[in-house]
Amino acid sequence: MVDFVEEVDEQIRAERLATFARLYLPWFAAALLALIVGWLGVWGYDAWRDRNIGAASVAYDKALGSLQAGDTIGAYNALDAVAKDGPGAYRALALMQQANIRLSAGKGAEAAALFDAAAKASPNAIFHDLSALRAAQAVLDTAPYAQVETRLKPLIGDKRPYSLEARETLAMAKLLAGRAQEARGDFNALGLTLGVSQEMRVRAQSAIALIDSGQAPLVAQVVRLAATLPPSAGPIIPGLTDAQGPGSQASGAQGPESQRSGGPPAKAQGGPPSRPADQNPAGTPE
């Protein structure tokens, strides 16, 4: 009798186990399959991104070599592939370099369009605001004041990385538009702002002195002349990390220098945006 009861219990347990397996085993298998596919997808994406970053780094470095050798046409064409299909910050850097090449050739409108494209492609606020600032500076002496103001106003604010540079450029724009007294007020406020670099403070004081002496037109001429001067070299970025991909290093990767208002355009071979000495934002996010 005991054996019979145990046998019945075993049959019941077996039936319950079979029922459970029929009901839940397909779901378990589907979940396991989804986990494997998801892991393979992440692995594949990481591998593709690393290859893409590596290819962009090589192409970008080759373009800079052509640029340093004086082959601006070859460099511009070499940067084109990175500017169209490059990952993250490499695309923004390539567009900024192309803009610098156009700017050094006196094509301010084309340079501004490329800087605008770089701003849209930028992976973070630092790259975006630098590109937008350079776009405004590229057309500072040719575009109507209202257009320059529209470009610069969004860049001004306590949390904007290039707020001081944008304020200085806007003051220069007012000066070029014949609004000398408004420009004087802006320069005076800028000179009294905490965190302003010594160089920017000296420029503000010099502009105020010239305005007070009745030589405001001379300041405007200097601003226009500055756009035609040979560009100055910018710093070299030591490496591109999270913004371009995990641990990626762009050997020789360089971009435009942060341009002070009224100054000459940054050299096309210069490094990418370094933080202004008077500011200290968080590191470049992805």
Image (spheres, helix red, strand yellow):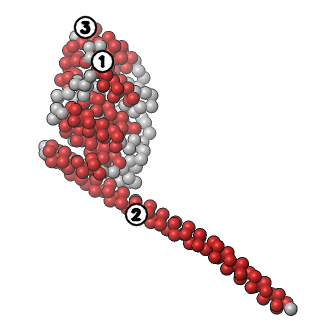
Q: Quadrant of residue 148?
A: top left
Residue receiving disc 3: 213
Find the distance from the CA under tag 2 to the CA under tag 1: 53 Å
Name the mark nearer the viewer: 1 or 3. 1
Residue at the image point whose x is 40% and y is 63% from the top? 44
Q: Amino acid at mark 1?
A: Lys
Q: Nearer the viewer, residue 195 or 72?
A: 72
Residue 224 shown left or right of residue 15 in the figure:
left
Residue 192, percent from left and from top: 40, 18
Residue receiving disc 2: 44
Find the distance from the CA under tag 1 to the CA under tag 3: 17 Å
Q: Quadrant of residue 255?
A: top left
Q: Amino acid at mark 2?
A: Gly
Residue receiving disc 1: 174
**Label 3, residues with CA under 10 Å away: few <14, some 14-19, many ≥20:** few
**Can residue 282 be seen here?**
yes
Q: Quadrant of the N terminus?
A: bottom right
**Label 1, residues with CA under 10 Å away: few <14, some 14-19, many ≥20:** many
